Amino acid sequence: MNKTVEFFFDFGSPASYLAWTQLPRIAEQAGAQIAWRPMLLGGVFKATGNQSPVMIPSKGAWMLKDLARFAKRYGVAMTFNPNFPINTLTLMRGAAGYLDSERFARYVHTIFEALWVQQKNLGKPDVVAEVLSAAGFDPAEFERLVNDEAVKERLKANTEEAVKRGVFGAPAFFVDSEMHFGQDRLDFVAEALAR
């Protein structure tokens, strides 16, 4: 039976971006499936009392250097977004809305790249519309999608489930019932999928 890795993520997390660049290869090598689990990191922080590492100056400075090290190790482009932190509620509703469609992968690629390679300020609706249009999405359709009550509820339910299962930040991965936190723990995810 094929293994599954659940990937709880938020676009506003640079570590989620780095994990996204690596997880598909890891899953493919293990013959595993990825269960994409968009969640709202701000909701997780509020529920758990956690906060972004950049809120602590010395930890934030270290984290920026560490993210750059990992981007270099992975051979991927990454430029820390000067607009960080960005309210990702609408973006994550988009992920929840496109989740079961053939457009999901393109949407995720578009948003992660815009935030962590192109440094776009996706906290601004007009910038989101511009980025989505350039990627072939209809901004009006996107606006309807992110305001759909079922989509809002799906994101809320994913976030609440994440908290109930012990998630305190992003990215978080589950293989079977075992949680692994942080893109720097992908080796443990690979090992768990190989078992």
Image (cartoon, rainbow, N blue to C red):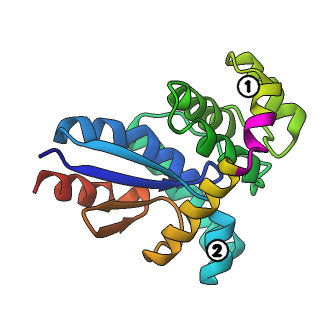
**Residue 188 occupies quadrant:** bottom left
Specify few, some or many for label 1: CA neighbours under 10 Å numbering under 14, 14-19, or 20 or more: some
Relative to 111, 176 lies left or right: left
Q: Residue at x 58, y 58 (%)?
A: 39
Residue 91 location (% of width, % of height): 70, 44
- Specify the label residue 14 is tagged with: none
Relative to 79, 15 lies left or right: left
Q: Residue at x 60, y 38 (%)?
A: 112
* Residue nearer the viewer, 156 or 91: 156
Above-or-below relation of 100 to 37: above
Q: Amino acid at mark 2?
A: Phe
Q: Residue at x 68, y 33 (%)?
A: 114
Residue projecting furthest to the front: 150
Above-or-below relation of 38 to 175: above
Tell me, yes or no, whether the two marked residues, 1 and 2, touch with CB atoms within 8 Å: no
Any part of residue 52 in sight: no
* Residue nearer the viewer, 157 or 170: 157
Return the residue at label 1.
132
Query: Which callout, 1 or 2, points at the residue further toward the start of the chain?
Result: 2
Q: Which residues are magenta?
A: 144-149
Relative to 28, 49 lies left or right: right
Q: Residue at x 19, y 37 (%)?
A: 29
Residue 12 location (% of width, % of height): 65, 52
Specify few, some or many for label 2: CA neighbours under 10 Å numbering under 14, 14-19, or 20 or more: some
Figure label count: 2
Return the residue at label 2.
45
Residue 83 location (% of width, % of height): 80, 49
- Residue 84 drawn in magenta: no
Instruction: Specify the quadrant that holds the C terminus.
Output: bottom left
Q: Secondary structure beneath disc 2?
A: helix
